[in-house]
Image (spheres, coloured by chain):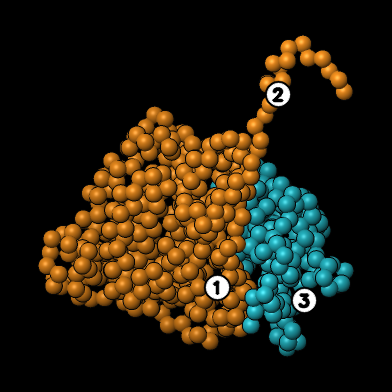
Chain colours: A orange, B cyan
Amino acid sequence: MSMQLEDPRIVEFDVRTDEMLVNMGPQHPSTHGVLRLLLRTDGEVVHEVTPHIGYLHRCAEKIGENLAPPQWIPYTDRMDYLAAMNMNLGLALTVEKLIGMEVPEKAMTLRVIIAELNRIASHLVGMGAYGLDLGSFSPFLYAFREREIILDLFEEACGARLTYSYLTIGGATHDLPGTIQIPPGLAALTRRSMNTRLTWLEALSLFLDWLEPRILEYHTLLTENQIFIKRTAGIGILSPEMAVSHGCTGPVLRGSGIDHDLRRDGERIYTRMYDGYDYNVVVAPFSNAPPEVVVGDNWCRFYVRMIEVVESIKLVRQAIERYPKAEGTHRVPYKMNTKLPVGDAYLETECPRGQMGFYIVGNGDAQPLRARAKSSSFCNLSVTSELCRGCLIADIPAIVGSLDIVMGEIDR
Amino acid sequence: MQAAEIHQRLVEQFGDRITGANLEALDPWVEVAPAAIAEVCTYLRDTPGLQFDTLNDLCAVDYFDADPKKAAKLGDTRLEVVYHLYSYPQKHSLTLKVRLPRWQNDRPGELPEIPTVSGVWVIADWHEREAYDLMGIQFLGHPNLRRILCPEDWVGHPLRKDYEFPLEYHGIRGR
């Protein structure tokens, strides 16, 4: 077709930049593990993001079908490895629901201490790693300094530092330790002798007293930092409708302004652990937020986690007071060959990353017919392609980081 | 709202397409005919007073055992798709179950079919891809039914009870 152009310069207006496919991951450091994102980009603008997952898949559910539930507990450690205690607790409570087991008060108080302490450790990593994603290195070092002490305390309690298998069906494998030597990190930070001996609960109180004022320092480092606000406020806005339809849970859901926390709104078998405790559910919007912040953006999701650390400190303090007076033992025995009743039980618990669900179908054997783990990060990750549509490439680590995913849990 | 009341409303609305229920179970469940599942879910989401606005979980269970003695305890040989629904405004939950044959028309290799609910809750998109990948269920009308956890060229559906572990995958020995 021959067409006479009146003005030859008009051709220049017809030129478009080429779309390019960019592969981000699976080894990109800011994808928090082995997540591969396939970006369709036009210059710096991202038109489409397709997450590819499954690099860590080991079919933990199939493994669970061939094991008695207590034997499957170590596999739950390796799902969300940053909050292994909460994973253990989720499975333990589901099996207790299925077989109708009552856990004594002492075990419940122990579980509150341990689960909330692991929530603090997990949110500290979330905070530190998020700073790292946005190019700020120092918060990461501070976060790991604090987390180290929690890991030392867990090591005293159960011997492991990452994959604990501590909370188990019926309670916990051991009681909390009595007198211990002060964790080296804590001794250095509180200027005490390395040979100081004190009880585990005293060491924990000492640590919490030290940690609480540090939260304000993190706020000056990150939350109120202008560069941080520019990178997070108003970016990756997740509307409440979208959050609900995508099955988002935990800080991602509360960052979008939906007031839902299973510790308060969950099933009785779970919420009774938290009876009588004084704490708040952290929900956006925040009155002290910078003016650029929009409900549901990266900043809100980050801030929910920061305040949840403060709330968890409150919970642990109250549990420490209750623990010496609590009745019963730390564990009700569960025999490995206990036959699971015919029937099924599904239970979700509030883990640091959202609502982790376990579904156990029993058929009269010690091994379940079906052991299902519903991952919270899996659902939270599914919003990535919606959130990243039309954003800049540099915002992708900021958005994916704010969802705080753990691939071990997504791929199972 | 109590499960019994929800069940009552579903029976009034859908009649014999609600094929069963157990309201005394730990998680009260209602059984739905496969063809009606998308309609039932839309009704549960959109009806005032029910408002099941999120899907907590979708998974499948394989009721099958090669050992006839053990299989007798499981009842009919079947696949069950289980939906765990939750309502944020009403703070109530419900479990839906759908029975499917293990193979469509009893011809091994032909995957059983069920309508997708990914148009009702967006998250069902990924959960259904996982159920297809691991359990081998064909979700009709799904926009993008590909494997999600296993590699694209994987053979078989690992969570099936009669799944045989591959001896070799791209030169990697399985056992």
Q: Name the residue under label 2.
A: A14
| Mark count | 3
The residue type indicated by label 1 comes to Leu
Q: Name the residue under label 1.
A: A98
Q: Percent x, y for residue B29?
A: 66, 63
The quarter in which the N terminus of chain A is drawn is top right
- Disc 3: CA contacts within 10 A as few (<14), some (14-19) or many (>=20): some
Indicate whether B44 appears above or below A406. Answer: above
Residue at 50%, 80% in the rendered image: A71
Residue at 15%, 69% in the rendered image: A194
The quarter in which the C terminus of chain A is drawn is bottom right
Measured in 3D between alpha carbons, the distance from the residue under mark 2 to the one under mark 1, in whole angstroms, is: 66 Å
Circles 2 and 1 in contact, beta carbons < 8 Å: no
Q: Percent x, y for residue A256?
A: 49, 41
Compared across the picture, whether A219 is left or right of B111 comes to left
Q: Percent x, y for residue A216?
A: 26, 44
The residue type indicated by label 2 comes to Asp
Q: Are marks 3 and 2 on the same chain?
A: no
Mark 2: secondary structure: loop
Picture quadrant of residue A39:
top right
Q: Mark 3 points at which residue?
A: B77
